[in-house]
Every structure is written in C-alpha cells, then in structure tokens.
Image (spheres, grey):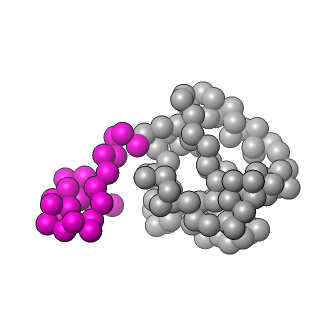
Amino acid sequence: MPSLRALQKAGRSNPDIKIYDVEKMKQPAIYIMTNKRNGTLYTGVTSHLVQRVYQHKNGLFKGFTSRYGCKILVYYELFDDMENAIVREKLLKAGSRKQKLKLIDSMNPYWEDLYESIF
C-alpha cells in the first residue's frame, strides 16, 4: 500500500486521484466479507475498516479470507468504541448463517461490494 505522503504527492499532480486522511478513518467496526452472493462468509472486527478491507481484498495476510477468496465487503456496522464492536462481532459469529444472510440482505440486497462507500 502506498504511503500517505506518496498518495498526497500523486494527488497534487493528478486531480483524478482521491486523497483521504487515513487517520480520520479509524473507527471500530464489524464487517462481513464474502467471495460471491450467498458464498463463503467471514465476520470480523477492526479499528480501521478501510485498511482492513484493503488487506483482505489484496490478500496481504494468509488466512481464511485469502484461502476462500473473500474479497467483497457486503456488510458493516460502525461503533463508537472497540468494546461494543467486539461484543457485536461475538454475537454475529455465534448466530446462524441464516441470520447473517438476512442481515446482509437487509442492508445490501444486491450484495454489492461496499468498499467504495466507506471512504
């Protein structure tokens, strides 16, 4: 991932490049990634949703999401503190697949990749 300084420099010379203040994007969140509609689901928690989804999409860490190709962000919730995010993640993980599918369908009925919407 390019450094913020490199992105800022590129953005000054190219108005089509969007520059984001990465530090301002930090916020606890839970999220669900998938490989396709009604496919394999991965539920996670993070303090930095944009960065974590980028890591999943680009296979930067070996593990479940890279093994099963879960690169599509289909659901997320933002929280004021990490403690509540962790509690919610545990509730989701303890729930059934059917409950997760219903949750995704309620927010994202077409299972579109929500990554661009979190900036």
Image height check: is 2 above or below 92? below
Residue 73 locus on image (x, y percent): 59, 60
Q: Could you tell me if residue 6 is visible in this image? A: no
- Quarter occupied by the N terminus: bottom left
Q: In terms of depth relative to the viewer, which is nearer, 15 or 21? A: 15
Stretch in magenta: 1-25
Across and down, in percent, residue 57 comes to 50, 65
Q: In this view, does 54 lie to the left or right of 37?
A: left
Nearer to the camera, 59 or 28: 28
Taking the image as shown, residue 22 lies to the left or right of residue 42, namely left
User: Which quadrant holds residue 66?
Assistant: bottom right
Residue at x-position 14% and y-position 66% = 13
Tell me which corner region of the image, top left, top right, bottom left or bottom right, holds residue 80: top right
- Residue 88 x, y percent position in the rendering: 69, 36
Q: Residue at left 76%, top 68%?
A: 38
Q: Closest to the observer: 64 or 17?
A: 17
* 98 left or right, relative to 111: right
Q: In which quarter of the image is residue 32?
A: bottom right
In the visual, does 78 lie left or right of 106? left
Q: Where is residue 78 in the image (x, y as percent from the top left)?
A: 57, 39
Residue at 21% x, 66% y: name it. Answer: 15
Is residue 112 one of those drawn in magenta? no
In this rendering, the count of numbered labels is 0
Residue that appears at 65% across and 70% down: 35
Q: Does the magenta stretch include residue 17?
A: yes
- Can residue 101 be seen from the camera position used here? yes
